[in-house]
Image (cartoon, rainbow, N blue to C red):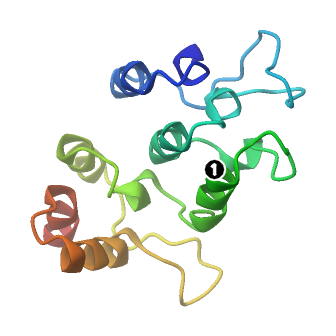
Amino acid sequence: MFASDGGYLDNARLLLVAGAEVNHVSSNVPPPGNSGEVTALGWGCLNLEMVQLLCAYGARREMLDPLDPEVPADCHARVLETSRWSTQLHHLELLAPARVRQLLVGGADVHASEGSGNDDPTPLGLARALLARNPAHEGAALVGAAA
């Protein structure tokens, strides 16, 4: 998904909403600093908003080299911060209400967690925290209602 390479956030969002495969491995020449398999996250890793969007649509974060000096610190920090988020629904703060509804109707588990500890965040826990900060957040309200 080359829209991620140029930082074309709106185009990337449209492609993802239309069903583009976020983890498709590119057969083209990889960008500088990447070798081997490159996905949309590898192409878009220089732009924090793109990293957030791609992760919200299920980008495999392990495809981003944590030691790559060309990747900005804020992008690495976002990947690290969300490393225990195991579902797309965990990214509900960035998702449109229609996408949250689609995930819930599709069977997304509001109690999902990585399972490696009791403090692992769940979409429901994140939704409750989000509603405490912003009671009008539609996506968080949908998750709360689904519980």
Give the answer, above or below, for where 84 lies relative to 59: below
Find numbered disc 1 in the image and state the secondary structure of the residue it sits on.
helix
Image check: 20 left or right of 101?
Answer: right
Question: Where does the image place residue 121, in percent across and percent down from the top left?
Answer: 47, 77
* Residue displayed at 56% across by 24% down: 4
On the rendered image, what quadrant is the N terminus found in? top right
Give the answer, above or below, for where 145 lies relative to 38: below
Q: Quadrant of residue 12?
A: top left
Q: Quadrant of residue 44?
A: top right
Residue at mark 1: 75
Q: Residues within 10 Å of mark 1 (few under 14, many from 20)?
A: many
Question: Where does the image place residue 47, in percent across and percent down from the top left?
Answer: 57, 37
* Residue displayed at 54% across by 80% down: 120
Give the answer, above or below, for where 37 lies relative to 56: above
> Which is more toward the observer, 106 or 47?
47
* Residue displayed at 85% across by 45% down: 69
